[in-house]
Amino acid sequence: VGNRAATFPLQLLGCEVDVVNSVQFSNHTGYPVIKGQRLQGPELLDLAEGLESNGIFADSCGDGRGGYTHLLTGYIGSETFLRAVLEVLGKMQAAVGTVRYVCDPVLGDEGKLYVPEGLVEIYAREVLPRAHVLTPNQFEVEKLLGRPLGSITTLREAAEAVDQLHTMGPGVVAMTTVDPIANDTEVAMLLSQKGHSVKWVLRLPRITGGPFTGTGDLIAAMILAWSDVHPLELPLALEKAGAVLQGVLRNTVDAEVGRPPRMYDGRRVPPELRLVQSKRVIESPEPEAHCSALWAPGPAGNELPPFRGVVFDMDGTLTLP
């Protein structure tokens, strides 16, 4: 489900995508029965050797315009595969120089771990120092920092937590769920850049009709794509990523109207994301929700920004208030 949720939207936005499935499953994990295979580290390295031997790391499209610019990872189910990813990243960087690594550290959600416990430490000690952008949910933030579940209880504590993640490596952290300020009608995300005194909070309407599967993969892919379009306007990139997510979920819910839901053991099987039907919103999102600034507290705990605005004369000279 991860690559399915990420690949088509990235391609619509002009990204050439080479896909490696860490798992090859018959269906998404919301179904009661799952069949398929998991790729192991040696198998990934075998694929990478073929790419490297054919010069594809250095010239990914065969047109002389250069090699890969980004690496995006999502669900990884084994230690050997995760360490192999880092080895592949090193090969990519050796071939072209800078490769921006966008890491969605899929560990779990809502108190449940999806992966072996040993992967948490590998992410914290080995992956985060190599990642440029990190897109964890709140559960994953707490796991990566070794904090108790549910220990982030305020927005300010969430901001302090992402600052801790910055010290571990990533320059950009997009916390994709912020439980203390979520409620029955809203969800929230928190965006932070290392060294910046301001963070950005994006509140979005909660869309009923779920649960949904693949939303984390979609938002990580859209943060990659739109931050590449707006590298100096990351709050705008997050707003557009959020608008894509909202549009896809609304189309998914609308497509289910009048259809009996799939049920298993008294619970609803998550519907398939309607990505093809969401082509227009993926290509041209129109954000209805906008980021609000969260400033770092001053010496006295004052959270007001250090200035309220700058006014210029028509000739461009600075005017004092």
Image (spheres, rainbow, N blue to C red):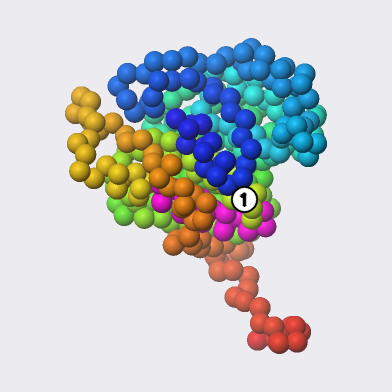
268 drawn magenta: no
Residue nearest the observer in this picture, 177 or 146: 177
Residue nearest the observer in this picture, 3 or 89: 3
Quadrant (top left/top right/bottom left/bottom right) for the C terminus: bottom right
Given the image, on which type of amino acid does mark 1 rest?
Answer: Ser
As drawn, is 281 to the left or to the right of 253?
right
As drawn, is 57 to the left or to the right of 309?
right
Q: Which secondary structure is most common in the magenta stretch?
A: helix
Residue 231 percent across, percent down from the top left: 67, 53
Q: Residue at x 63, y 17 (%)?
A: 44
Query: Mark 1 — residue?
Result: 227
For label 1, the crowd category at 10 Å Cα-Cα, with few meaning under 14, some 14 to 19 and many 20 or more, is some
Residue placed farthest to the front in the image?
63
Q: Residue at x 41, y 51 (%)?
A: 247
Residue 273 percent across, percent down from the top left: 39, 39
Quadrant (top left/top right/bottom left/bottom right) for the N terminus: top left
Q: Is residue 40 visible?
A: yes
242 drawn magenta: yes
Q: Is residue 168 visible?
A: no
Residue 183 percent across, percent down from the top left: 33, 52
Extent of the magenta region: 231-248
Q: Is residue 112 above or below residue 211?
A: above
Q: Residue at x 70, y 28 (%)?
A: 89
